Image (cartoon, rainbow, N blue to C red):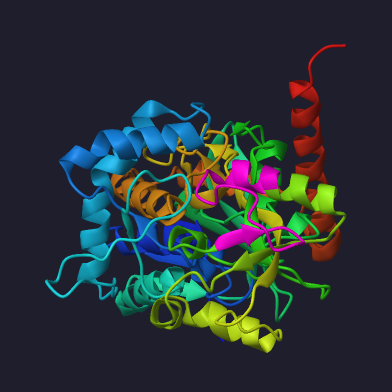
Amino acid sequence: MIKLSKKYDVIIVGTGVAGLNCAINLPEDKSVLVICKKTPDMSDSYLAQGGICCMVNDDDFEGYFEDTMRAGHYENNPKTVECMIKNSPQIIADLTKIGVRFERKADGSYDYTREGGHSRNRICFHEDCTGKEITTNLMKKARSKKNVIIVPYMTMLDIICKDNECYGIVAKDGKTGKLYRILADYTVLATGGIGGVFENSTNFRILTGDSLAICINHGVAVDHINYIQIHPTTLYSKKKGRRFLISESVRGEGAHLLDKNFNRFTDELQPRDVVTAAILKQMKKDGTDHVWLDMTKIPREEVISHFPTIVQRCLDEGYDVLRESIPVVPSQHYFMGGIRSDLNGKTTMQRLYAVGETCCNGVHGKNRLASNSLLESLLFAKNAAIDIKNGYCPVDMPKAKAAEKALSLEKYHNVNKLLKEYKQIVLNAIKEANENEQPDN
């Protein structure tokens, strides 16, 4: 059993690529606590299949910039997009340095693939489990650092704050039921998406947007909470639980979408929201619960080497992608809105940072370009770590202890009830945002 301290220099909530990359980039003389609801591998980062974008060369900047802006309906923050793109080669170099194995050509150069919305091949990948490859190596690096402690089955229930300054978190051990109030000089929210509040989602069910609700409760700004991306292709199933993603790379490599008569009905390489709309329209026209995805257009050897996880999962469900089409349907996939943050992950509350899918820094606009998620999470989490390092200032302990003492612990004892309340806060905020976008009658 891990014994927690009363105070850490930095607390990070979440063990996806954002949380882990922030942890490994913090100074080694700072104590860092990283917590997660369940096991560390239960993050959407771990599930990411397609890959991670990288600016191929300087001549690719304009094309990559335009692709990202167009996919986001030009609601992106141009400065954030520019920052992400120009720093993408360094992020790939960082990952390679810690052991991430990206596919390469015979000459040693990256074997870039392509996905919907991209005007050229610029995506680094490892088979069809790029997220697992990256997350595993980041976890290995984080565990090797003596100043970093990773604690599973620890749920954040609230932040400790007063006068718009964060002093740490309230958390509960999922196994022992013990309640903790842990102080910190800085707190980083890297809690992932909100798929757990939807019936059909590619996300783990535990990702329910708790940090969003907590921030709303404490007056921390959130933006575009109704900017929710639907992935066009998840494996159709009547079983309950998380939906299995069929990577966009499949369509990038030549797979076709087919209607009930097995006729092609759309351009598969359009941005995700456009393809999703086309699929839903076709399902309505055909009166079906799904459309079909034909991977037989891709060379057999490439399917086996590039998409082994997809091949096996489909076999488990009774489909042989090498010989037949598979049923696919759109499902909730990604969250473009979130806790407002800047290029360094700073929120509108002092000493509180937000990085990864749980934040909104404007890089994705209204719709995320494929394979920008891992890159965005890694880069701005690294920026947050550097910002904390450069401006490090210990918390005022008398103020922190006063904020802690002022907490009423009564509401934290029934965790299930509290998390249901948080889920409803998120759903209400989404509904309100959607209603505010409706044109006046």
Toward the top, the furthest residue is 441
The quadrant holding residue 292 is bottom right
Q: How many marks?
A: 0
Stretch in magenta: 256-278
Q: Residue at x 78, y 57 (%)?
A: 419
Q: Is residue 218 magenta?
A: no
Which one is in front, 169 or 77? 77
Q: Is residue 268 magenta?
A: yes
Q: Quadrant of the C terminus?
A: top right
58 in relation to 143, above or below: above
Which one is in front, 360 or 31? 360
x and y percent of residue 144 in the render? 31, 79
x and y percent of residue 350 in the render? 48, 36
The quadrant holding residue 9 is bottom left
Q: Residue at x 83, y 12 (%)?
A: 440
x and y percent of residue 370 in the render? 47, 51
Q: Residue at x 57, y 68 (%)?
A: 36
- Whether residue 361 is visible here, answered yes or no, is no
439 in relation to 397, above or below: above
Left or right: where 383 falls relative to 58:
right
94 in relation to 305, above or below: above
Left or right: where 52 falls relative to 14:
left
x and y percent of residue 50 in the render? 45, 64
Left or right: where 22 falls relative to 368:
left
